Amino acid sequence: MDAQTKYRLKRFFTLRSVSSKIALAFLIAGSCLLAAISSIASSTIDELITEMMASKEATDIQYLEDYLSDGYWHVKNNALYKGGLRIGDGSTRGASTKKFEQLEDKTGTYYYTFIARYLVSDEILEEVDARSSPVTDFVRAAGSTRDADGNLIVGTYMDKKVSDHLATHHTYQGFADVEGRNIYCLYKKLIGPDGNVIGVVAVGHSVEELKRAGVRVYVRIFDAVFVLLILATAGILIIIYRWLRSMNKAKGYLERIGTGVFPEEPLEFGTRDEMDDMAVCINEMTASLREKERIGAELSLATDIQAHMLPTVFPPFPDHDEFSIFATMHPAKEVGGDFYDFFMLDDHRLAVVVADVSGKGVPAALFMVITKTLIKNQAQAGLTPAEVFTKVNHMLAEENETSLFVTAWMGVLDLESGELTYVNAGHNPPCIREGDGAFRYLRSRPGFVLAGMDGVRYRENHLTLSPGDRLFLYTDGVTEATRGKTELYGEERLLEFLNTHPTDVVEEVLPALRRNIDEFTDGAEQFDDITMLLLNYKHAKGGNGMTVKEFPATDASLQDVLAFVEEELDKAECPMKLVMQISVAVEETFVNIAHYAYSGAPGLMQLGILADPEGVTLRFTDRGMPFDPLKRADPDITLSAEERKIGGLGIFMVKKTMDEVTYVYENGQNVFTMHKNFR
């Protein structure tokens, strides 16, 4: 016997298998059925046999009358006759019992007759009275019935219960006491030619015989039922065996699925019943699971691809210590529609983007990839943030059959000046912390969402960051994280958290914020993607920080500009001679911007100064008409004042007095930079 068989037998006899439980249940049910059949049969068979005996005894009386003799019943010479056959007069010596005994031998029925008492002679009555009591109306004339000792009981009286009944009825059928024996009888009155009752004819059966007959019938029925139960049990066990074999086959099939193996071959039973229906369901489930596994593997791959599409190496730019940055994205499903991005446009400009695609799952993720790629490509092509959003919106909205849209925020930070140029396309306002202050929301009028409608033009906003300032960008998965059914994490709770971690290392703030959100939601399922980015501006590129100030581009601002320059030069202990040269160069440059950059329209000029003991760098930025003053030819100073052309002398003086002068037009701005060494 192998181990598997032993294991199955052990499970069967310890009632740990389905088959053993079914067998036990069937055994109990069969026993109860046999008991019920026995109980019902016990009473039913008795009733049935009694009814059968009643019918048989009616026939037996007729049979007796025919068997005794032809003719009618009558009394002659105080004796009972049937036709010409003398039956008896109530005495043993006058009784004719031979035919009664012959008939009993043939049929097994007791036969006897009674003669009315008033027809019996006094001599016989005296003999009868001496043998039996109490006195009844009929005396036994002849018959086959004997007493318990085997003696004929001719001459005895009828049971008083039967006699009383016959006083008012023609027949009696039921149990009667016959000389101490309980007999089931049928009594019938005999009517003479004159219409008077002359006697009674009776047939009967011993109750013990009836019981023995009932037992025989009961045993036969029990045997038949038992055989049927055995056959039914065998049939059911065969069905159970086939069912369990199918179930074990299904169990093995499902165990393989449970281990992650999805069989290619279908499960088949060949039973053409519910088991085959179950096999169809299991095969459909297996196919569905196989498909889900394939989709799950593809989604897992898509998750990895999406994760690697976002910047994940921190710090991202080891050569740039002017800032630190950290970002995370936690999709609500395998893939998400949120994204963040940051990249260097050149050596001193950093672009940051956070966006949220409407919807979730694969469609949103695909739209996210397209949007991220378009934004980065357009930004690296030299467009301003507003121009980037305007063009990307056109490209997305042109064939947007999915009706998806994107909320996005993009900023370009000049690492030298700290100037932040940003644009908002329907996105959440970021949080900013300036200096030693608290975080606040950087609110501006947002533009329309990307891909929502073609032809939208976006406007830019400007802000100058100082060293130590922080910028926090996020998607609405943060503020709309939900506890219960209605309570949101909200903007106030976000500000409260940021203000309790104002100067923490950026790589530590975002994981702590995510834990705080999880504690708030108390384990609820994440409903939306959660994306966060934190930027810390440390210092200006090339030094400890360029001081930047903005002025109206008008002649009235000249003295303020010069005062600002002289103050910064004093801090750097610049020699007085160089202060004068630098001030002249600043004046010439600013006046040129004030007069020509905006063609008389109002505008702004931003001046950044970076000074140290080695020298000073000044950078003029305006958004006026593009103009490169360095392309203008230098004036011929050998000519007299009358002979020289007007203009060009100021920039010529700047180039001669400064050690380095550069111009570039980028991001929609004129950027004029000059540097002067102190030594």
Image (spheres, rainbow, N blue to C red):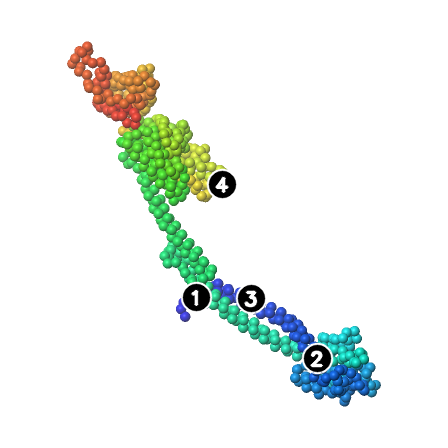
Q: Quadrant of residue 216?
A: bottom right
**Vertical side of 499 occupied by 169: above or below:** below
Residue at figure coordinates x 19%, y 11% from the top left: 641
What is the C-alpha distance between the residues marked 2 and 4?
95 Å
What is the C-alpha distance between the residues marked 4 and 3?
53 Å
Residue receiving disc 3:
29
Which amino acid does the dot numbered 1 rest on? Tyr
- Nearest the viewer among 229 and 164 is 164
Circle 4 SS class = loop
> Of the residues under marks 4 and 3, which one precedes in the sequence?
3
Which amino acid does the dot numbered 2 rest on? Gln
- Nearest the viewer among 654 and 51 is 51
Q: Nearer the viewer, mark 2 or mark 4?
A: 2
Residue 484 is tagged as 4
From the top left corner, tell me how far across and down residue 111 is, in percent: 71, 82
- Nearest the viewer among 373 and 319 is 373
